[in-house]
């Protein structure tokens, strides 16, 4: 089972259509009003079930879509996750990407819209991206079908659990160690519990007590502290893998002809005034 996950408007649904073709099923996830699409692709005579998850910006939100995707990811409903990102706006997509990495699920990263990124002078070092995060990275352009046939084989053969880890505020990291030691919970379960998310009652109670202390210290909710740390990590990661070509300044004839135009008008006005004074 493969799940496609990503922000809205990254071309995920178009990739899903390419991978599954006809025979797509629409189902309503129990307890929500959210529809999810699933289809089957045959690879080496083996059926591969592919699910197109709703586009979201975060795994810790409270919308129906965010809760649905979070539940499916935390319950290990998929053997592999295919994370689809917009190559032309990679930094803004990295927030969700870093969250998904924290769930320790085998995954690959598909940097879609590579053609648009190239037109904007954006170059992404996919090897550096892969080395830093620990998951395979593939450039695609869904609108022209570039590299789409490579997605499923790469997901089946090379998907990996990423090793990149966001460094949180020292109080958050201390809470992770303390709650993990006391409850036996893993890192992501503690991070969610600090935001009041989860089903382990004892973990949630302990996390609530520590979260209150952290919030009093920082004068802000734990969720905002986590978000700030993730945004910082996303910015630093993008600096290491993205190169932007310098914008060339136009030097066409229209530019230098127009530049002195206001001065010409002023001089003409002065000359006209002088001539009027002479003849009057």
Image (cartoon, rainbow, N blue to C red):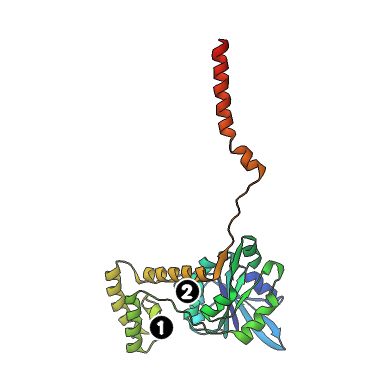
Task: Please give the label number shown on residue 71.
Answer: none
Query: Dot 1, crowdedness within 10 Å: few (<14), some or many (≥20)?
Result: some
Task: Please give the label number shown on residue 59.
Answer: 2
Q: How many marks?
A: 2
In-front residue for pair 64/101: 101
- Quadrant of the image for the N terminus? bottom right
Residue 10: % across, % down: 59, 67
In terms of image quadrants, where is residue 176?
bottom left
Look at 60% across and 67% down and name the residue there: 123
Vertical order, 215 against 106 (above or below): above
In-front residue for pair 73/90: 90
Look at 62% across and 83% down and name the residue there: 155
- Give the mark nearer the N terminus: 1 vs 2: 2
Tell me the CA gap for discs 1 and 2: 15 Å
Task: Please give the label number shown on residue 187.
Answer: 1
Look at 40% across and 68% down and name the residue there: 228
Judged from the image, the secondary structure of the residue bearing numbered disc 1 is helix
Closer to viewer: mark 1 or mark 2: 1
Residue 63 in sight: no
Label 1 close to label 2 by CB (< 8 Å) = no
Judged from the image, the secondary structure of the residue bearing numbered disc 2 is loop
Residue 256: % across, % down: 62, 41
Query: Dot 2, crowdedness within 10 Å: few (<14), some or many (≥20)?
Result: many
Residue 90: % across, % down: 55, 67
Left or right, 21 with respect to 56, comes to right
Residue 144: % across, % down: 71, 67
Left or right, 20 with respect to 6, comes to right
In terms of image quadrants, where is residue 42?
bottom right
In-front residue for pair 198/150: 150
Residue 2 in sight: yes
- Quadrant of the image for the C terminus? top right
């Amino acid at each position: 089972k493969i799940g496609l996950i990503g922000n809205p408007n990254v071309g995920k649904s178009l990739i899903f259509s390419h991978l599954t073709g006809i025979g797509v099923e629409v189902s309503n996830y129990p307890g929500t009003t959210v529809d999810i699409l699933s289809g089957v692709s045959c690879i080496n005579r083996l059926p591969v079930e592919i699910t197109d998850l709703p586009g979201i910006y975060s795994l810790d939100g409270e919308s129906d879509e965010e809760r649905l995707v979070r539940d499916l990811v935390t319950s290990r409903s998929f053997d592999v996750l295919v994370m689809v990102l917009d190559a032309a706006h990679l930094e803004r997509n990295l927030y969700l990407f870093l969250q998904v990495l924290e769930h320790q699920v085998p995954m690959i990263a598909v940097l879609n819209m590579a053609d648009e990124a190239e037109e904007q002078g954006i170059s992404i070092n996919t090897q550096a991206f892969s080395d830093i995060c620990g998951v395979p990275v593939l450039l695609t352009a869904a609108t022209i079908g570039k590299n789409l046939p490579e997605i499923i084989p790469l997901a089946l053969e090379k998907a990996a659990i990423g090793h990149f880890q966001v460094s949180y505020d020292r109080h958050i990291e201390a809470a992770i160690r303390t709650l993990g030691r006391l409850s036996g919970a893993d890192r992501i379960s503690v991070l969610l519990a600090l935001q009041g998310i989860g089903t382990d009652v004892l973990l949630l109670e302990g996390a609530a007590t520590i979260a209150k202390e952290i919030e009093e210290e920082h004068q802000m909710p734990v969720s905002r502290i986590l978000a700030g740390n993730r945004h910082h990590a996303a910015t630093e990661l993008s600096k290491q893998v993205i190169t932007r070509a310098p914008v060339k300044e136009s030097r066409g004839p229209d530019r230098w002809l127009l530049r002195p135009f206001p001065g010409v008008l002023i001089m003409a006005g002065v000359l006209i005034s002088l001539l009027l004074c002479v003849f009057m």
